[in-house]
Amino acid sequence: MNTPKFPGHRDDDAASGITLDHLLGDESLGRVRRFAKGAYVWQADDVADRIYFLREGRVVLTTAMPHERPIVLLTIAPEQPFGELCLCAAPTDLRGTTAYALVDSEAVEIKQSTFLPYLHQNRAALDALMVTVCLRLKDAYHRIEVMAHRGAEQRLGRLLVRLATSRERQGRIGRRGRVSVSVSHNELAQLGGMSRPHVTVTMGRLRARGFVDTEREGVVRVDVASLTDYLARVPRTGGRKRASTSAGEQPNRVAKRTD
């Protein structure tokens, strides 16, 4: 399964958050583990009792929905931590997500019971962890806002705007002030909780309206200003605005899903 290599939901500034450097070279706090491409780091029913720092490779965190297509929550690059929510978990709490190696990867695994005392003794590491948590919380709010839109154009459009304007992925400004974003239709589907065919159809609509165009395979140019203005004007559900009901007529309160 192809998974986003970027992602726009990676830490906004990895250098300001906690990394392997904050372990002060003391990787003896944990053990080094190697994961072959496609291997699970954890599954949904595993206990959340350890944190990881990626040394090499790339790891993807997804929702745990075995009977539905998963949604990518986060992609981890080397030096970055993942599994940090174990620090606020009870001893028997489960992960509730899955994490797997996108490519052959290597990570330092540290037990919660070891890492918490280390943080108490290292203020710099604690401060850096707080930055990482805040950055990821901010990004989670952005993702919730995107996913709250049921209309395909609204959801996909706002996701593209988010990717194009992310500080982590500033892209490059091209002709007519468009921002280039490296992302495939399959990656957009996984990020937006949509099917790939639906993404392709919706991208065709946005392209016809002049908001996006394809620079080359896997690279989309986004007219952020025009697309943002359009999204502010179209209905939240992506359908046409319903005419006012006549007196005594009960409005249909069931919104039809468009995706």
Image (tube, grey):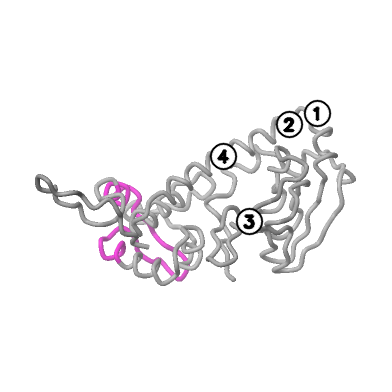
Circle 2 residue: 126
Q: Which percent across, then down, holds residue 64? A: 61, 59
How many marks the image carries: the answer is 4
Compare residues 174 and 240 and report the one nearer the observer: 240
Tell me which numbered mark, 2 or 3, is placed earlier along the sequence.
Answer: 3
Q: Which percent across, then down, holds residue 33? A: 83, 58
Residue flagged by tag 1: what amino acid is it?
Answer: His
Q: CA distance from mark 2 to mark 3?
A: 23 Å
Residue flagged by tag 3: what amino acid is it?
Answer: Leu
Circle 3 residue: 61
Callout 4 crowding tier (Cα within 10 Å): few <14, some 14–19, many ≥20: few
Q: Is residue 232 left or right of residue 12?
A: left
Circle 1 residue: 120
Q: Residue at x 76, y 45 (%)?
A: 92
* Pointer 1 with pointer 2, Cβ within 8 A: yes
Q: Is residue 25 left or right of residue 237?
A: right
Tell me which numbered mark, 3 or 1, is placed earlier along the sequence.
Answer: 3
Callout 2 crowding tier (Cα within 10 Å): few <14, some 14–19, many ≥20: some
Compare residues 196 and 124 and report the one nearer the observer: 196
Circle 4 residue: 137
Single out the residue that lies furthest toward the left: 247
Q: CA distance from mark 3 to mark 1?
A: 27 Å
